[in-house]
Amino acid sequence: MFTISSAQEKQCTILISFDGFRWDYLNRNLTPTIDSLAKQGVRASSLEPVYPSKTFPNHLAIVTGMYADNHGIIQNDFLDDQTQRRFKISDTVEVRDARWYRGEAIWETARKNGKISASYFWPGSELNEEQRHPNYFERYDMKRPYQDRINGVLKWAALPVAQRPDIITLYFDATDTQGHAFGPHSPQVNGAIAQLDSVMASLIAGLRKLKITDSTNIILVSDHGMTDVDISRTIVLENILKGEQYQTEWSGPTVLLRSTNGRDNQIVDLLRKKMQHASVYMKSEFPEYYHFSCNEMIYPVIIAADLGWQVKANALTKKDSVNFDHGNHGFDNHQMDMQGILIASGPAYKTNYTSGTLKNIDIYPMLCKVLKIGPNPNADGKLERIGFILR
Ligand code: AMP
Ligand code: ZN
Ligand code: ZN
């Protein structure tokens, strides 16, 4: 079946996400391992997320090559009016329900083409339909020690070639978790950056031990960046919309709103007159460059806070002030603070190559090219915007 040389030639691509790892965290002199990986391969000056710059919409954008409008996961938490069901990342039943997911993830495309895929965590990797999840996967457990995740990936990478994955995903939350709690400039975030660099060192050492570094591509990305927020920069809608009847979804950088008595236009006018530090749009006129106005689950009014500001439906409570985060994301995806990272190294990638900003939706067609399979034609991502980083 497989000769030794074909076994050695089989490439394995490992796609790793460091949640909330802002583009400039690499400039803090805390990442010797990632720096040398970048030198051996490609480093993009930043990776542009899709709107809204949140975890699930962006991890799905990366693996499907689609904007949130199209892959359907418009937030970490949203309501389907038709069924009255709510998608919520803490609700494992909903997170695993394939009906929410409208895109084709790279592992589905891989399976259709006879390739083997695996995931040691990734949003959307646990779907309850056989052909729509990776061949091997682990159910998300935030508390799973990072070294266990590395060991799991190395175990897959060491499988006999007929079972070895062509593509593996891997996920770590540390920079996001510390970034929310303490802000992007905190010592805690710096600690998380250093921790993740040593996680990379451990993975690379493991690959070296297996003697498969030459046939392994490593693509390190993040889903979005992080910016400083403060409770004093909060906009409270009920203070502005006294007497109006409406429902809202979400709080923070983006809030969706709908009038319950047909006054969406009047509410937009009122907010435009009275609200500072945020922009308000009818969904139908939300600028095209956000690619966030087609999905039927988006309410008719979109309120988007300026960078560092946050919108809330109701007045702040005592609990809000105790629990208030110091960092957040979800803002305009073109803002520099919302940009993530992309580093790619291995036999498929150019060496010592620095590119400008890349778009995360273009990663899917690039992965298809590396795996030598045809992409889903409905993807929004384009190989021509990223293909130049390949060898
Ligand atoms: P965000 O609110 O956008 O910062 O989302 C980050 C959160 O997503 C982190 O607390 C992670 O624990 C969580 N998360 C990441 N991957 C998954 C997953 N596969 N399933 C459920 N939750 C996840
Ligand atoms: Zn995230
Ligand atoms: Zn986050």
Image (spheres, rainbow, N blue to C red):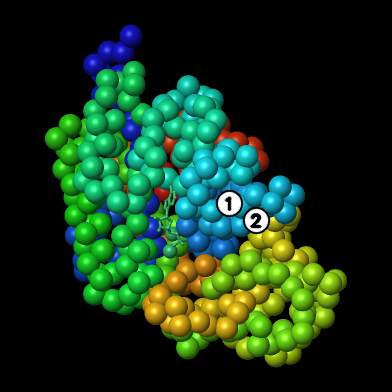
Q: Position of residue 370 (x, y in %)?
A: 43, 36
- Give the answer, above or below, for where 215 lies relative to 329: above
Q: In the rendering, which numbered label is found on residue 87?
A: 1
Label total for image: 2
- Label 2 SS: strand
Q: Is residue 230 left or right of residue 35?
A: right
State the residue at coordinates (65%, 82%): 237
Ligand 1 location (quadrant)? bottom left
Q: Position of residue 286 (x, y in %)?
A: 71, 68
- Label 1 SS: strand
Observer-nearest of 10 and 67:
67
Q: Are marks 1 and 2 in contact (CB under 8 Å)?
A: yes
- In the displayed image of the protein, which residue is found farthest to the front? 318
State the residue at coordinates (39%, 79%): 322
Kindly identify which residue carries mark 2.
Answer: 79
Please tell me how crowded label 2 is: few (under 14), some (14-19), or many (20+) other residues with Cα within 10 Å: some
Q: Position of residue 65 (x, y in %)?
A: 55, 46
Ranked by sequence position, the earlier of labels 1 and 2 is: 2
Let me know if residue 47 appears in the view. Answer: no
Q: In the rendering, which numbered label is found on residue 141?
A: none
- In the displayed image of the protein, which residue is found farthest to the right? 262
Observer-nearest of 191 and 38:
191
Identity, as a three-letter code, of the amino acid under mark 1: Phe
Identity, as a three-letter code, of the amino acid under mark 2: Leu
Q: Is residue 211 left or right of residue 224?
A: left
